[in-house]
Amino acid sequence: MEPSTPRAQRARRMADMLRQQITSGAFPSGLLPGERELGARFGATRNAVREALGLLRSEGLVVRRQGVGTVVATAKYDHELDRLSGLAEALTGHGTITNEVRAAHLVTEVPEAVTERLELPPSADAVYIERLRSSDGVPLSLDTTYLVADIGLPLLECDLTGRDIFALIEETTGSLLGSAEVSVHAVTADPGSAALLRIPTGAAMFAIERLTRLEDGRAVDVESLRIRADRLTLTATLHRQG
Amino acid sequence: MEPSTPRAQRARRMADMLRQQITSGAFPSGLLPGERELGARFGATRNAVREALGLLRSEGLVVRRQGVGTVVATAKYDHELDRLSGLAEALTGHGTITNEVRAAHLVTEVPEAVTERLELPPSADAVYIERLRSSDGVPLSLDTTYLVADIGLPLLECDLTGRDIFALIEETTGSLLGSAEVSVHAVTADPGSAALLRIPTGAAMFAIERLTRLEDGRAVDVESLRIRADRLTLTATLHRQG
């Protein structure tokens, strides 16, 4: 690399490249190469290597294990944004998703912001579901969902502990979902979310808002997802032609 | 809302809904309604309203202005993930993007991680470009780019201060880009990135890795983008059918 660049910048670049390699599965054993080999591979000094590993430790991506070296802290899963899918669908083959159902009931006084978003009259009821979703016992996502009442009520009789809401909607209505409008924010974890997701307060989280529609365009489900950023990467293949 | 839920959860839900309204432009003047009106609109107590506003202040989305109330801190722009586009293209109509070119030159000793990612032989040269991108003078994104040499060298003669790399590649090669593989991470800002982007250390940032290919599938450009999460939202419309 260019000698003119300060070490911190080289360390950041190396951290970026190493993050990409780690999350794309370049180290299947979980053990990273030693500092000397990493330095050779990334054209970085020993100090820059240490600084880069420090950045990735502070993200929660790797940990230093006494007598072993630097290891990947926890598998980071890809959630593809190329298609509308629920968490369990997106992570098929990567552990079992289970949900702690923290709330699931009809709400008769629905906030105006929710009825507006769901394109309902102000007096409409809605079904509220809140779930803490874990993969192999480790928390991944805190999801709160408001559903239009006629779609949501049958879900209260379904397996909310084991299933994606999307799959349940399609099974109970007998029709496919159409599309969703998704907004992805990055935020730091407030103490309450941090405690539930078992991450440090101030750790990075995705905050995702998703409004889902049936094939006929009807809005049925507005969700807030708080996702552990140390466990999930959002991926997409984008095309230049629209 | 359900009285059984603790206030912190109600405050988080309110913060999520209010974030969505703010970023979708519900308050064009920038001034939020007063606490009483917000409470009525979101079915929340005064204390929950205050807690929700505190969460959004800690994200840098809103600030409290003495004698005025709570105002939107800075416009948050949508960067659509539905199509491969550069920052200036994505933000067309939302202020002028200018770039501080921090590095732009040929690199003869390219890290192995980069040549592998660009599908080049280990001995290949590459062009390195590093830019701090601002919208109307406020930093938005710190972008580092490695380009294959034959595509990158002509760009060194181009207007790197004012233009997107994507547009410049298409102009100098005379052919369109094809697609890009994008990975989106949420991380907290290290002191160096924070200083450049003028955000607090520890603030949330997007860290995006993007590998771009020409229409014929050739990898030409691998980028690391560090984006201020208080200024940019990633949005997409996802479809259920693949």
Image (cartoon, coloured by chain):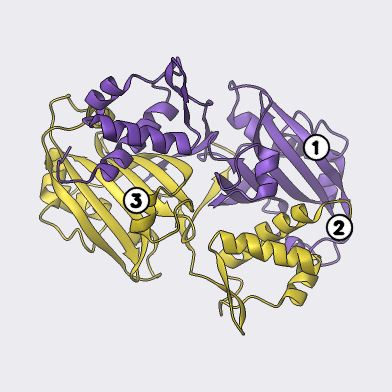
Chain colours: A purple, B yellow
**Residue A67, image quadrant:** top left
Label number found at residue A3: none
Q: Residue at x 17, y 32 (%)?
A: B110
Q: Mark 2 lies on which chain?
A: A
User: What percent of the width, then of the height, locates residue A114?
Assistant: 74, 60
- Above or below residue A213? Residue B63 is below
Crowd band around label 3 with a 10 angstrom C-alpha radius: few (<14), some (14–19), many (20+): few
Does residue A28 appear to the left or right of A219 in the view shown? left
* Residue linked to disc 1: A101
User: What percent of the width, then of the height, locates residue A205?
Assistant: 56, 45
Nearer the N terminus, badge 1 or badge 2? 1
**Residue A108, image quadrant:** bottom right
* Residue linked to disc 2: A125
* Residue linked to disc 3: B192
Amino acid, disc 2: Asp
Q: Which residue is drawn at 89% across and 56% down?
A: B3
Q: Of discs 2 and 3, which sits in the foreground?
A: 3
Does residue A155 appear to the left or right of A232 in the view shown? right
Q: Is mark 2 on a helix, strand or loop?
A: loop
Amino acid, disc 1: Val
Res B20 seen here? no
Q: Is mark 1 on a helix, strand or loop?
A: strand
Amino acid, disc 3: Gly
Q: Which residue is drawn at 61% across and 46% down?
A: A201
Query: Foreground: B20 or A138?
Result: A138
Q: Which chain carries label 1?
A: A
Distance, label 2 to label 3, CA atoms, is 49 Å
Numbered disc total: 3
Q: Is mark 3 on a helix, strand or loop?
A: helix
- Above or below residue B23? Residue A80 is above
